[in-house]
């Protein structure tokens, strides 16, 4: 009962937030609604006993990805009105595509194919069941190979991003820490020994 | 045969066995070497950059040796069924190594001339090869998808590698966005299969499908999306929009790479997913592939006629050849598969050589990718022009070059399953296609050149290009050996 | 629970509401002392930094005519801020402008839900992914800063928000990795089990700070950076960008930001105490703890948790009094190029230590 109520509340909020993401005029507001959508999705996952995924969604997407997203969006001066220029013109086609997609989805992803008749209701786990532990066990045994490939993909992404964006410009000043540390007193101060000149000056 | 092989790869969730790392040692070795090249490149000074290139070639060599050394005689599964090593995989991987090594060799001078001779180029190339190896050896939806992403990500970056070129950046953007959509399609289709059968393993999938009705709407729906995704990646019409733009915009050395090795991996993808995993849905995907292949043949050959740019023309030519390759796959027989495999390997080598000609023709600071650049080539360098003649003959399908034999095999396979009309359509479009290949030959031999200065070709390029082109002739004359290997790989 | 609710409506409703009341009471019982601590932390800061700089600090405001070393100061400050006007800048986004401080404080307080105070006290301390929850919630605190900076419609505030978001994302990774080390060492994500994994006969030598020393240092410094405290307070940077993200805040809105900062400090100190310093366990070896009243005092208990938290809090103040502010690029370098590699290397070391059952921690 409580679960059902919370499911509908979170699902409703999720749909509300998701539709606000695409209808808001201000991109920053859109991004903030996306954050809200992530939260509600995480709550739904919690209801599915997938606490690791739920918390990771918040930690990674809300805590890091969306922060960087906002970082960029806030600095750009995006003219949303201009982006929506063709909106009315393309609306009929878009509507037709959307309706077709919706019909297809209803045909395929419905209780007829994925309902309780096809799949047994998953058993509830005891309260000491740790979703995180189970995931870890699977990832590092059965799915070890895909897991390692994913790591390689991330490495390629880093290499690609750096290779495509880094350029050495002449004339920029860099702090060379190792040279700063290695510096010795004689490199900075020259101690000059010279004969006393005080005789004439003193008079 | 393929079906019976694929049933062994059962994912055991309860009892986990330590994977056989030796079996995957080529992948492990290449990954380590790619990382090594990445780090070593940091310590290599600008003028010794060629060391990075040598290291990359050595990595490929080492991987080749390992692959052949550990290759099992029959399909063997490890990593809980996510990895498969079989004769088909060994053959395709070997072809990929050879093609990539040649691409690296061809592209060295091109990169140096444009100041993009960087270590990252080779690192990304090696990671691309790793992605292709993973795709070839994949036996699970997850590994297929991840291998594909690893390859695609490397290719996107390589297309944009020439940072100063606006065209390259634009091509990379288009490639990336369309590629991402294609990946999405593929994933969506896979998720449908997962929903319907409850497994990601291709062997289990094949068994699960056997029990299902053939018109199960979820499966058909998933199949459509999977095929759309695959067609996108291979560049079959109507999902070919990115091919000409990317081929045109990318640096020629990268175009050469994209047009050759990844196609082989793409073929492997079709084989693993359709022939192994969804063999029982053959009727379903055959119809879809017929449409894709007829459209590819038509659009590829007809639009190529109107091109004035050699790279774009070759792009459309690729599309039409993809049509032929799909013909062999849709036959669904061992004959058809081996014919397609023969076709894709020989086509990759031919296309690579054709792009090598553009590299040979271009000079520092300028591209020679217009058809007009070919005018009077026979007067500037008769030998190179003759080699190009062989390549164009092969692409057209003129005997005794290998292209003829490849087309013949595919058509045979189609006729054997009583789809004579399809064979006639394919031949008809090939005849149309012959026009633009022959036009290239006409330009080289009968048109007046803008400049008559002899073409300067480095010895290295000359030897490689000649060997490559002569191989096209040689395999055409004696196709038996390669054909036998292809048949053995699938038997 | 829900079956009970369905079958015996009245009884179920009663149990349900009783549980809710219990939870709310628990929250109040935790929050009231916590807010008092926050208030007096500001006082402690002024006093302690004052002594470090050979000043006296606030010593006038007391209660009922007695000065009491200035103990009334935070109360007076709070009353003052409550009655000041909240000025909303022109063209600022009013809703977000007022939401920002609330988000800051809410995230700082929400993380306390999974924190065990001793071996039985805590609000939702049985959650088995407590460590992840803490990480996720603390990573949200940056939204308060970003939204404040953006909605203020001011250059300085915006610059502060930008600096802060880059900094927090950078240090979150090091922090997360440091906590992975704790996770490996304890073998659990539940904070109570993490503390219990540090139990032993050797007292403070049993705690994780020793085998995880580099992670402990990295975690604590990252914690300082995450809370935007000196020497990582470039987001405020009063000498460059006036007061950074909260330059346009006044009155209670400003006070809430202030409270959030100090609540975050207490949270980080408490987490450090739990994960690296044995939570509520006594630092004395088991052999030294006698029976009786004196034993209760020296033996494990909630007071040790409070003392340890206070101990780590002193460091926050000490840093502020002694270190000059980092330059922005130095902060980035420290986060990405120093801390992250250190934590990754030490993760391997910890894993090896756990596998090799290195005593007294992992046997």
Image (cartoon, coloured by chain):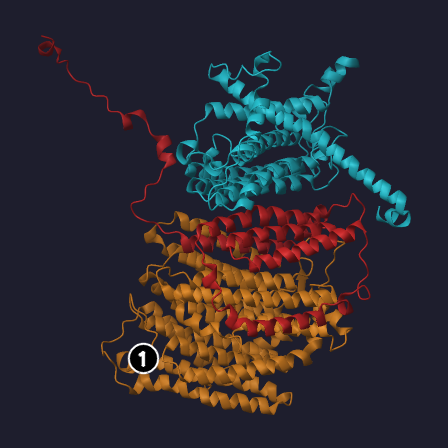
Chain colours: A red, B orange, C cyan
Image vertical order of residue B469 relative to residue A143, above or below: below
In the rendered structure, the answer to whether residue B99 lies left or right of residue B420 reads left
Image vertical order of residue C215 relative to residue B158, above or below: above
Marked residue chain, label 1: B
Residue at horizontal 44 percent and vertical 50 percent from the top: A75
Nearer to the camera, B194 or B57: B194
Give percent across and percent down for residue B179.
52, 66
Q: Quadrant of residue B71?
A: bottom right
Image vertical order of residue A34 relative to residue C30, above or below: below
Q: Is residue B215 visible?
A: yes
Q: Is residue C215 visible?
A: no
Would you name the residue on which mark 1 appears? B374
Nearer to the camera, C274 or A28: A28
In the rendered structure, the answer to whether residue B364 lies left or right of residue C335 reads left
Quadrant of the snapshot with the C terminus of chain A: top left
Q: Quadrant of residue A13?
A: bottom right
Give percent across and percent down for residue C106.
62, 38
């Amino acid at each position: 009962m409580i679960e059902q109520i919370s499911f509908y509340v979170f699902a409703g909020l999720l749909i509300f937030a998701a539709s606000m993401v695409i209808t808001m005029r201000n991109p920053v507001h859109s991004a903030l609604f996306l954050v809200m959508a992530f939260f509600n999705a995480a709550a739904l996952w919690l209801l599915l006993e997938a606490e690791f995924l739920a918390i990771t969604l918040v930690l990674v997407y809300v805590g890091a990805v969306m922060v960087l997203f906002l970082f960029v969006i806030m600095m750009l001066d995006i003219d949303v009105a201009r982006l929506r220029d063709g909106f009315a013109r393309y609306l009929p086609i878009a509507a037709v595509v959307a309706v077709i997609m919706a019909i297809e989805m209803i045909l395929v992803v419905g209780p007829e194919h994925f309902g309780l008749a096809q799949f047994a209701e998953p058993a509830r786990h005891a309260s000491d069941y740790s979703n995180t532990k189970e995931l870890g066990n699977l990832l590092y045994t059965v799915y070890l190979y895909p897991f390692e490939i994913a790591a390689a993909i991330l490495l390629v992404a880093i290499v690609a991003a750096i290779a495509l964006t880094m350029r050495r410009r002449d004339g920029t000043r860099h702090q060379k820490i190792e040279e700063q540390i290695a510096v010795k007193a004689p490199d900075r101060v020259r101690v000059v020994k010279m004969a006393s000149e005080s005789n004439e000056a003193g008079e | 045969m393929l079906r019976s092989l694929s049933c062994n790869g059962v994912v055991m969730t309860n009892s986990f066995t330590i994977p056989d790392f030796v079996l995957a040692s080529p992948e492990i070795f290449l990954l380590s070497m790619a990382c090594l090249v990445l780090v070593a490149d940091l310590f290599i000074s600008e003028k010794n950059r060629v060391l990075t290139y040598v290291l990359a070639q050595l990595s490929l060599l080492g991987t080749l040796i390992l692959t052949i050394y550990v290759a099992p005689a029959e399909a063997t599964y490890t990593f809980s069924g996510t990895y498969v090593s079989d004769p088909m995989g060994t053959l395709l991987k070997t072809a990929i190594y050879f093609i990539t090594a040649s691409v690296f060799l061809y592209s060295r001078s091109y990169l140096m001339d444009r100041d993009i001779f960087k270590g990252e180029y080779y690192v990304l190339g090696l990671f691309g090869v790793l992605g292709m190896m993973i795709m070839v050896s994949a036996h699970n939806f997850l590994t297929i998808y991840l291998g594909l992403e690893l390859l695609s990500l490397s290719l996107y970056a390589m297309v944009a590698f020439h940072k100063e070129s606006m065209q390259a950046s634009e091509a990379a953007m288009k490639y990336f966005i369309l590629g991402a959509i294609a990946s999405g399609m593929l994933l969506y289709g896979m998720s449908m299969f997962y929903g319907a059968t409850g497994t990601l393993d291709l062997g289990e999938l094949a068994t699960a499908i056997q029990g299902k009705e053939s018109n199960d709407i979820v499966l058909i729906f998933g199949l459509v999306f999977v095929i759309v995704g695959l067609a996108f990646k291979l560049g079959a019409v109507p999902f070919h929009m990115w091919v000409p733009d990317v081929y045109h915009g990318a640096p020629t050395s990268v175009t050469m790479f994209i047009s050759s090795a990844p196609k082989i991996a793409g073929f492997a993808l079709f084989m693993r997913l359709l022939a192994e995993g969804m063999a029982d849905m053959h009727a379903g995907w055959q119809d879809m592939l017929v449409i894709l292949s007829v459209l590819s043949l038509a659009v590829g050959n007809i639009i190529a006629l109107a091109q004035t740019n050699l790279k774009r023309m070759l792009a459309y030519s690729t599309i039409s050849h993809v049509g032929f390759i799909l013909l062999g796959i849709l036959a669904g027989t061992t004959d058809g598969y081996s014919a397609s495999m023969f076709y894709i390997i020989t086509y990759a080598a031919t296309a690579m050589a054709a792009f090598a000609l553009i590299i040979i023709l271009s000079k520092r600071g300028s591209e020679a990718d217009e058809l007009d650049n070919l005018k009077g080539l026979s007067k500037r360098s008769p030998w190179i022009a003759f080699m190009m003649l062989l390549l164009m003959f092969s692409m057209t399908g003129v005997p005794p070059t290998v292209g003829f034999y490849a087309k013949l095999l595919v058509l045979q396979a189609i006729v054997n399953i009583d789809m004579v009309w399809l064979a006639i359509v394919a031949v008809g479009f090939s005849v149309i296609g012959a026009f633009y290949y022959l036009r290239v030959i006409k330009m080289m031999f009968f048109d007046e050149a803008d400049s008559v200065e002899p073409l300067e070709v480095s010895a290295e390029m000359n030897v490689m290009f000649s060997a490559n082109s002569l191989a096209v002739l040689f395999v055409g004359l004696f196709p038996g050996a390669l054909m036998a290997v292809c048949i053995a790989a699938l038997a | 629970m829900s079956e009970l609710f369905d079958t015996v409506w009245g009884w179920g409703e009663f149990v349900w509401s009783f549980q809710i009341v219990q939870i709310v009471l628990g929250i109040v019982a935790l929050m009231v002392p916590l807010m008092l601590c926050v208030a007096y932390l500001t006082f402690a800061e002024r006093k302690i930094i004052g002594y470090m700089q050979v000043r006296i600090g606030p010593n006038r405001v007391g209660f009922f005519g007695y000065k009491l070393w200035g103990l009334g100061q935070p109360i007076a400050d709070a009353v003052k801020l409550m009655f000041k006007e909240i000025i909303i800048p022109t063209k600022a986004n009013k809703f977000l402008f007022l939401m920002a401080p609330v988000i800051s404080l809410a995230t700082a307080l929400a993380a306390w839900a999974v924190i065990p105070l001793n071996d039985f006290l805590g609000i939702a301390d049985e959650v088995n992914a407590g460590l992840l929850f803490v990480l996720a919630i603390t990573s949200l605190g940056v939204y308060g800063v970003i939204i404040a900076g953006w909605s203020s419609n001011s250059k300085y505030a915006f610059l502060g928000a930008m600096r802060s978001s880059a900094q927090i994302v950078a240090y979150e990774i090091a922090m997360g990795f440091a906590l992975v080390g704790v996770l490996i060492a304890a073998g659990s994500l539940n904070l109570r089990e993490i503390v219990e994994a540090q139990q032993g006969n050797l007292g403070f030598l049993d705690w994780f700070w020793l085998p995880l020393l580099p992670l402990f240092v990295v975690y604590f410094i990252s914690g300082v950076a995450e809370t935007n405290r000196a020497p990582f307070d470039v987001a405020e940077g009063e000498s460059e960008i006036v007061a950074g993200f909260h330059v346009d805040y006044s009155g209670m809105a400003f006070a809430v930001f202030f409270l959030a900062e100090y609540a975050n400090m207490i949270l980080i100190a408490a987490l450090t105490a739990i994960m690296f310093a044995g939570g509520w366990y006594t630092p004395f070896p088991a052999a030294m703890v006698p029976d009786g009243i004196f034993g209760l005092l020296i033996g494990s208990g909630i007071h040790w948790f409070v003392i340890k938290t206070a101990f780590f809090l002193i460091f926050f103040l000490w840093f502020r009094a002694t270190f000059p502010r980092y330059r922005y690029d130095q902060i980035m370098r420290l986060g990405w190029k120093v801390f992250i590699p250190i934590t990754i290397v030490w993760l391997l070391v910890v894993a090896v230590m756990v596998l090799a059952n290195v005593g007294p921690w992992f046997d």
